[in-house]
Amino acid sequence: MKYVSTRDPQLATTLSRALADGLAPDGGLYIPQVMPAIDAASLDGRGALHELAPRLLAPYFAGDALARALSAICVEAFDFPARLAAVQGSPERLSLLELFHGPTAAFKDFGARFLVACLARLHAGQERTLTVLVATSGDTGGAVAAAFHGRPGVRVVLLYPEGRVSPVQVQQLTCWGGNVTSLAVRGSFDDCQRLVKQAFADPQLRADFALTSANSINIGRLLPQLVLFAAASLQVRQGDGDPASFVIPSGNLGLATACAWAREMGLPIGEIVLAHNANRTVPDFLADGQWRPRASVATLASAMDVGDPSNMERLMALYPGQSIAGRLRAVSIDDATIRASIGAEFARSGVALCPHSAAGLAAYRALPADDRRRGRWVVVATAHPAKFPETVEPLLGRRVESPPALAALLGRPSRKTLIDARIEALATELRKDPCTP
């Protein structure tokens, strides 16, 4: 299997090179040269994720140096569950796909651990330190830091928007030290993402550092997420005989892209509905066909505060021209509706939701009744509600207990550096020793 740039199909490379580089030389994102097909009837979604994953991902690793290690990589990455839980008190056949049972209580743990397992093997024996750049709107940075912290030969540099992530998320981003540098950027997530892309495009920085990315611009983040949708869709088919339709809280569109790839491979997936917050770039595009990236606005669902989502390049490549509007739907949910959804779902079913998962469930409730009654729906729950206590707890009228792994992080000391949203400021920090103030 070869991988090509979304901007130039002549720029083809191996999976290992795509993983190591993160971004294509022309600034595009890597995609499979040919989308592989799989016989979904031969797959069983009731087993462990690490058993299903190698069968699903084998075509993507075919002919690559990492192919022999695929099973071991999957064992390392998928060592906690993705639970499909029925929503009690709902008249429809509705489930939540709980992706927050990992070490940092967010779905990003799957992709981060998978990418670490790949990069650790690719970088073994190298003299130069691998510098992993991460633009994060909250959960990605914490997951990547947890996965890479303390690994020799690797440095992680996190960029997050100052004042635009929850206090718990800030703690997860800044509590590491050692080989993890935490940079609070005066700006938005889009500014952080722009800085990462500028660093990759800077010839001097590429010469000075062995750079890679752990954002969903890196294809190593998307492949394990594909497994999550495959497993859930197979469980639904085996239980009900119907394909699963998914509602996905969406920001940079990594999860959405992974779900779309799984469907194109032949997994039993019906509709894909993207739940966005007040950042309406994608809903407006699917409505009128005009792509108009814009500055992001801050909302309660901060990880979805993206005005120029990178993975739209991958979705446009998958669904060229106007076909994308017939393959995806999008719903915009405002803060008032997110708050109402948190309180209403807890009263209805006893389920506590984070703001992002609440936006997803609100998007499902906003679908026409005929759509909700047709088939089997799964709303993706992306993070544990304990990561957003200042928002969730007043609406529930009770305290939300933190998972043990998350509680342990909250007691650690933290350290960050505040920088302007300029490539010169990032370059200055990259040239500092990460282990000294």
Image (cartoon, helix red, strand yellow):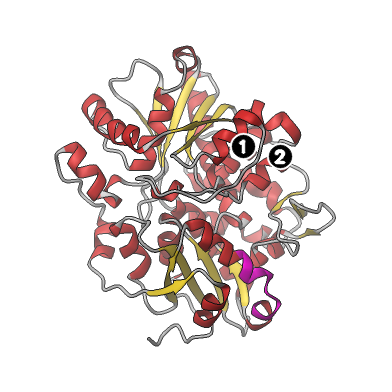
Q: Quadrant of the C terminus?
A: bottom left
Instruction: Look at label 1 and name its amino acid.
Output: Ala
Kind of element beneath mark 2: helix
**Name of the residue lying farthest toward the left:** 398
Q: Residues within 10 Å of mark 1 (few under 14, many from 20)?
A: many
21 relative to 80, above or below: below
Q: Amino acid at mark 2?
A: Leu
Q: Is residue 201 magenta?
A: yes
Q: Is residue 52 visible?
A: no
Disc nearer the start of the sequence (1/2)? 1
Is residue 293 shown above or below 371?
below
| Res 170 → quadrant | bottom left
Tag of residue 365: none
The magenta segment is 197-205
Furthest toward the right, the residue is 10
Q: Is residue 309 visible?
A: yes
Residue 334 % position (x, y): 39, 35
User: Residue 86: percent from the left, percent from the top?
Assistant: 35, 27
Q: Residue furthest top?
A: 370
Q: Residue at x 27, y 33 (%)?
A: 351
Depth order, front residue of 84/145: 145
Closer to the camera in the image, 299 or 157: 299
In the rendered view, does 127 fall on the left or right side of 379?
A: right
Residues tagged 1 and 2 counted as in contact (Cβ below 8 A): yes
Residue at 47% over, 43% down: 48
Residue under pointer 1: 260
Of residues 233 and 402, the one drawn nearer to the viewer in this rendering = 402
Q: Main secondary structure of the magenta part?
A: helix
Q: Mark 2 — residue?
A: 318
- Classify mark 1: helix, strand or loop: helix
Image quarter of residue 120:
bottom right
